[in-house]
């Protein structure tokens, strides 16, 4: 059902094919004979605030096949587009509603949610972005792109699956098999919520989001009605990927944010990848370099242990590069901005430290009081110029057994072997 991987630069030898439909599902269309579909994680969230109109419009402009996003319930039962179960990270709720901690989404009405700024936390130019409703999202996407809709935390959003089904039945344009270039997919970590959707909307493909690929017997049972499995790329192993493919299920891991991981995942035979950087992934799939703004400065390493955690930027060009105002953004979309007067000489490096310290020609300290980089499972980093253009992408994987860490040295591929058993 899957064509075999080629040995070329991440391209399939023949046309991409999706697994056969399961239980009446309509599988997502492949894209132009390419090996894997691009799923824009919460929109183009490496370049714009997640789950906002700005991020979704950018993902469409960048050629994403799907946008992947999250739906929850407001206090008055409206379906709203937001990832976290609290409003604290991605809105100004702590300022607007200072007396209402812990700022859970389901404790606020839609009218209250509309008062919040969902973009300024990311960057000043996005101030004024708002939390969208599901209807607003569907209207925005139209027939321009597919939608992978995650039922977020059904346990704290009771009735979520039922509400989504009811709303989709009113939006028949999203349900008719074959009516859209790329269809709707509904996903969740919650298997019961997926069962509820599948029972009521059998023509809608459903995807099980997981950390690890389910064990053999359970995977066989799931293959009777699940369309795809979405495992954490940081915990995916080749033998588990092979089991998904053998079961006839689509394999779409999350969140895959570096050229090394993209190529490794392609070699495993993935059908798609969920990424914060859909434009860069599309460039790689089309045979172009994934960083159009590359200027010779790369992320050489990330030392993620605190205290003393830092990222190492290396100038591999033969010219000095002024990186003042450049910034690093992690997978959670927080950023560290490099201060003024930092020029990296040819072959030189700059260590960008999380925390206080004394700056010099080879070190910049951002003064943070808490850790920035994920030291449990792994993280990714986008290096951006001051104008926002992406310069380099880097990811590291920390395996649960602790014996494999995967990063990258510039020009040399992975620092260690890709994650294997």
Image (tube, rainbow, N blue to C red):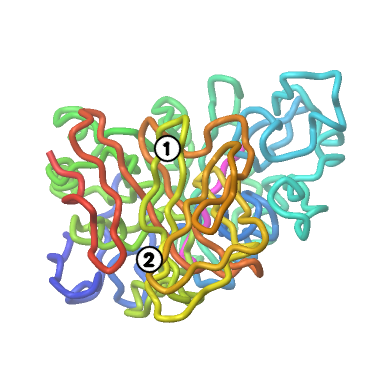
Give residue 285's position: percent from left, percent from top: 34, 72
Give residue 60's position: percent from left, percent from top: 57, 68
Give residue 115's position: percent from left, percent from top: 87, 40
Name which residue lies at 54% across and 27% down. Answer: 153
Q: Which residues are magenta?
A: 64-71
Q: Is residue 307 left or right of residue 98?
A: left
- Disc 1 vs disc 2: which is toward the camera? 2
Q: Place residue 198 in its image quadrant.
A: top left
Q: Is residue 408 left or right of residue 195?
A: left
Name which residue lies at 46% across and 44% down. Answer: 310
To which residue does mark 2 refer? 29
Q: Place residue 287 in its image quadrant.
A: bottom left
The overriding secondary structure of the stretch rendered in magenta is strand
Sort mark 2 into few (<14), some (14-19) or many (20+) by Cα contacts within 10 Å. some
From the image, which quarter does the N terminus lie in?
A: bottom left
Which of the marked residues, 1 or 2, is nearer the chain's N terminus? 2
Q: Is residue 19 left or right of residue 124?
A: left
Sort mark 1 into few (<14), some (14-19) or many (20+) by Cα contacts within 10 Å. many
For residue 41, which numbered disc appears in the image? none
To which residue does mark 1 refer? 198
In this view, 337 is above or below 38 = above
Q: What secondary structure is found at the residue carrying circle 2? A: loop
- Residue 67 in the magenta stretch? The answer is yes
- Residue 171 in the magenta stretch? The answer is no
Q: What secondary structure is found at the residue carrying circle 1? A: helix
């Amino acid at each position: 059902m899957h064509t075999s991987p080629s040995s070329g630069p991440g391209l399939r030898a023949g046309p991409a094919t999706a697994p056969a439909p399961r239980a009446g599902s309509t599988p997502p269309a492949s894209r132009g004979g390419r090996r894997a579909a691009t799923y824009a994680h919460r929109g183009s969230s490496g370049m714009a605030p997640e789950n906002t109109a700005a991020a979704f419009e950018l993902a469409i402009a960048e050629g994403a096949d799907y946008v992947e996003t999250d739906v929850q319930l407001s206090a008055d039962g409206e379906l709203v587009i937001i990832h976290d179960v609290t409003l604290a990270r991605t809105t100004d709720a702590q300022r607007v509603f200072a007396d209402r901690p812990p700022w859970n989404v389901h404790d606020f009405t839609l009218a209250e949610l509309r008062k919040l700024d969902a973009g300024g936390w990311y960057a000043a130019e996005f101030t004024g972005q708002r939390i969208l409703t599901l209807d607003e999202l569907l209207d925005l996407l139209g027939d321009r792109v597919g939608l992978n809709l995650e039922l977020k935390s059904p346990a704290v959003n009771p009735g979520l699956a039922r509400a989504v089904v009811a709303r989709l039945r009113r939006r028949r344009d999203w349900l008719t098999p074959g009516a859209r270039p790329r269809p709707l997919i509904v996903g969740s970590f919650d298997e019961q919520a997926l069962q509820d959707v599948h029972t009521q909307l059998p023509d809608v493909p459903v995807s099980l989001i997981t950390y690890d690929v389910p064990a053999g017997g359970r995977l066989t049972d799931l293959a009777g009605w699940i369309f795809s499995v979405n495992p954490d790329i940081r915990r995916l192993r080749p033998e588990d990927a092979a089991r998904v493919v053998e079961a006839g299920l689509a394999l779409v891991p999350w969140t895959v944010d570096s050229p090394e991981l993209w190529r490794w995942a392609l070699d495993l035979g993935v059908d798609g990848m969920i990424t914060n950087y859909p434009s860069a992934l599309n460039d790689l799939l089309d045979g172009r370099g994934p960083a159009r703004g590359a200027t010779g400065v790369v992320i050489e390493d990330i030392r993620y242990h605190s205290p003393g955690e830092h990222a190492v930027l290396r100038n591999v060009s033969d010219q000095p590069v002024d990186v003042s105002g450049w910034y690093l953004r992690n997978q959670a979309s927080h950023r560290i901005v490099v201060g003024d007067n930092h020029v990296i000489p040819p072959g030189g490096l700059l260590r960008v430290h999380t925390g206080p310290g004394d700056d010099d020609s080879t070190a910049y300290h951002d003064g943070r009081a808490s850790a920035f980089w994920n030291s449990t499972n792994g993280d990714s980093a986008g290096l951006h110029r001051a104008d926002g253009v992406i310069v380099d992408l880097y990811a590291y994987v920390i395996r649960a057994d602790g014996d494999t860490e995967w990063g990258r040295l510039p020009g040399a591929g992975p620092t260690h072997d890709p994650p294997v058993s």
